[in-house]
Image: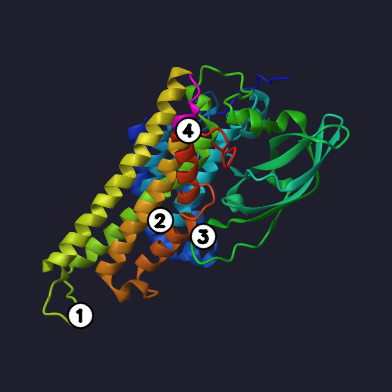
Amino acid sequence: MTTTAAVPQTTTAPAAALKERAAALVPLLRENAARTEADRAVAQENIAALTEAGLFRLTVPRRLGGHETDFRTFLEITSELARGCGSTAWVTTLVNVCNWMVGLYPEQVQREVWGENPDARVCGVLAPSATTRAVEGGFVVTGRWGFASGSLHAQWASLGIPVVDASGQQIDQGAALVPMHELTIEDTWYVAGMRGTGSNTLVADEVFVPAHRVLSVTQGVQGTYPTEHKDEALYRSALVPVLALVLAGPQVGLAQAGMDVVTASLAKGRGISYTFYEKAGESPSTQIQLAEAAQLIDTARLHLMRAADDIDSWAARGEYMPFETRARVRMDTGYVARRSREALDLLLSIQGAGSFAEANPLQRIWRDQETSSRHAVINPAIAGELYGRSLLGIQEQVTPLI
């Protein structure tokens, strides 16, 4: 039964104001980036500042105290945050996209999550790495879900499960929404980059999940969502394009962060070792590499925003994005990652071997990008394969996640 209890209201901010708030937080995130990495968790000061700025409520429905922003705004904000700290931007991304998924559930579920706290945060893992047992009123779930980014700062988790009938036969794949206090976090996130995301393993042991808190992923991939609020365009957006593309926002921001570091260094007038250049910025090779890196970042950003506009425009029209466009968004996602990595590679070459000194933030930016851009959903090679098949009209695909 849908409750009609009063919901705490917060002021909904326009997109421009939210972007300004994100830009204003970059110095703080940059200052705390080394500590976030060392602690293997986003600095609590960052979490508090993001919460106060309303940047964890980007995709919470307005009727429940959120901003309900479109995905262009979402990506502009998360790419801006990555200029300060890759791990913080990644956690902000994953919390907001998991919050968006909650907007696809029935209103009863949405009110369970945000009815008393519009700042409640959700993490999630889509892979159905669990076993389930059908019982009266829902399912009993046992499983382990790795790489749960943002789980250290979440109150809920959306977790992939096999949906089974009374005989134990799988009939669907679902996303089960579970309170974090019913799960345990296993400390498994020991990695080269994005260390501060705290992407540890979530564990469920015989946890009951009521049926209304299980979303059909199979139906979701086809654009069928159980939310009663069909007039809210944001929650008509195509599932897989959203889940893939949001991961590319921090890629552009990390490349821009590298540009910020290198241009600041060049402005100080350092030379090029073992040459007659007393100022590296006077070297034509430096100028050309810097221009090429800037062009690659621009190219990545243009593809990122084209794909975001695709998602937003189809949702605004109330039409589900066609297969060919969904495949292109997957391709755009991988392309953004490749171009961003290439840009950062050029910037590292400009900076030289000193880029890899522990005191130089460029090495952390590089490690964060090299790690996050290898997320399975970003994979440029797989994206190219599925997009090429789509262009050729080949029906058989390599993944259902399109």
Q: Could you say where residue 286 lies in the image, as x and y percent from the top left?
A: 18, 65
Separation of marks 2 and 1 at Cα, in angstroms: 32 Å
Q: Number of marks in the image?
A: 4
Separation of marks 1 and 3 at Cα, in angstroms: 34 Å
- N-terminal of the pair, mark 2 or mark 1, is 2
> Mark 3 — residue?
196
> Mark 1 — residue?
273
- Magenta residues? 319-326
> Mark 2 — residue?
29
Crowding around mark 4 (Cα neighbors within 10 Å: few <14, some 14 to 19, many 20+) is many
- N-terminal of the pair, mark 3 or mark 2, is 2
Q: Residue at x 23, y 56 (%)?
A: 292
Marks 4 & 3, CB-CB < 8 Å contact: no
Q: Amino acid at mark 2?
A: Leu
Q: Residue at x 38, y 53 (%)?
A: 338
> Mark 4 — residue?
326
Q: Secondary structure at mark 4?
A: helix
Q: Nearer the viewer, residue 56 or 260?
A: 260
